[in-house]
Amino acid sequence: MDLQEEKSIVLKAQKDPQVFGLLFDQYYPKILNYASRRVPSVALAEDIAAETFCIALDKLWQFKWQGVSFSAWLYRIATNLINQYYRNQHKKLTLSLDNWLEKTGFEPVGDIDLEQEIIDAERELERYDDFAEIRKKLQRLPDRYQAVIALRYFEDKKIKEIAEILGKKEGTIKSLLSRGLDMLRD
């Protein structure tokens, strides 16, 4: 989805919440994938992805086009929730996707099979034994390095996109990326 199409859908969704389903269908798998690479379980990643879209729907009226794409906004929300999880590991996010769908009455408009998405994500994680080791090392890093490395290497985001998502300057992102990789090597 290009930026103009995304903008058009967001503007329509701000007036008609049912249109939000198009954004959900487009970005839910990406946000779920991002979260599943940052947290220890797919179930938790599902909770974070669901909470991300619940927050986005609730705050959609506040979203303004100021040089940051809607998808960057979603990644920022997800990153904040992941950071919150690690700060408060003893507290569990209580809003699951099923609870959110029940609470809002919202249904995705596309033909995606959310359960299949989760199963596929679990299989992908299981296939890469090295990934578990990398994730353990990554989770030992401070949150700011985890987010930058995950967005760059797991989500294939460019430096500029990461800067938009995290609300930081491009130079800061480059520095965080470099330092984070050095910490991983050590």
Image (cartoon, helix red, strand yellow):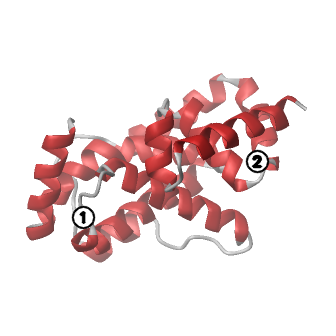
Location of the C terminus (image quadrant): top right
136 with respect to 97 (left or right): right
Residue 72, above or below 126: below
Q: Callout 2: 10 Å neighbours few (<14), some, many (20+)?
A: some
Look at 65% across and 50% down and name the residue there.
Answer: 39
* Quadrant of the image containing the N terminus: top left
Which of these two is toward me, 182 or 34? 182
165, 103: nearer the viewer:
165
Observer-nearest of 172 and 164: 172
Q: Quick check: 179 above or below 66?
A: above
> Does any portion of residue 40 appear in the rendered image?
no
Q: How many discs mark residues in the rendered view?
A: 2
Q: Image point 13% across, 42% down: which residue?
A: 5
Q: Callout 1, which amino acid?
A: Lys
Tag of residue 137: none
Mark 1 surroundings within 10 Å by alpha-carbon count, few (fewer than 14), some (14 through 19), many (20 or more): few
- Element carrying mark 2: helix
- In the image, is 95 to the left or to the right of 13? right
Earlier sequence position, callout 1 versus callout 2: 1
The numbered mark at residue 139 is 2
What distance separates the C-alpha of mark 1 from that of mark 2? 33 Å
Residue at x 74% of width, y 25% of height: 129
Residue 69 image point, x, y percent: 30, 49
**Could you tell me which secondary element the residue under label 1 belongs to?**
loop
Asked whether the residues under the numbered discs 1 and 2 touch, taking CB atoms below 8 Å apart as contact, a structural biologist would say: no
Please name the amino acid that badge 2 sits on. Gln
Residue 30, placed above or below residue 75 = above
Q: Can residue 80 be seen in this view?
A: yes
Q: Which mark is residue 64?
A: 1
Dividing the picture into quarters, in which one does residue 91 lie? bottom right
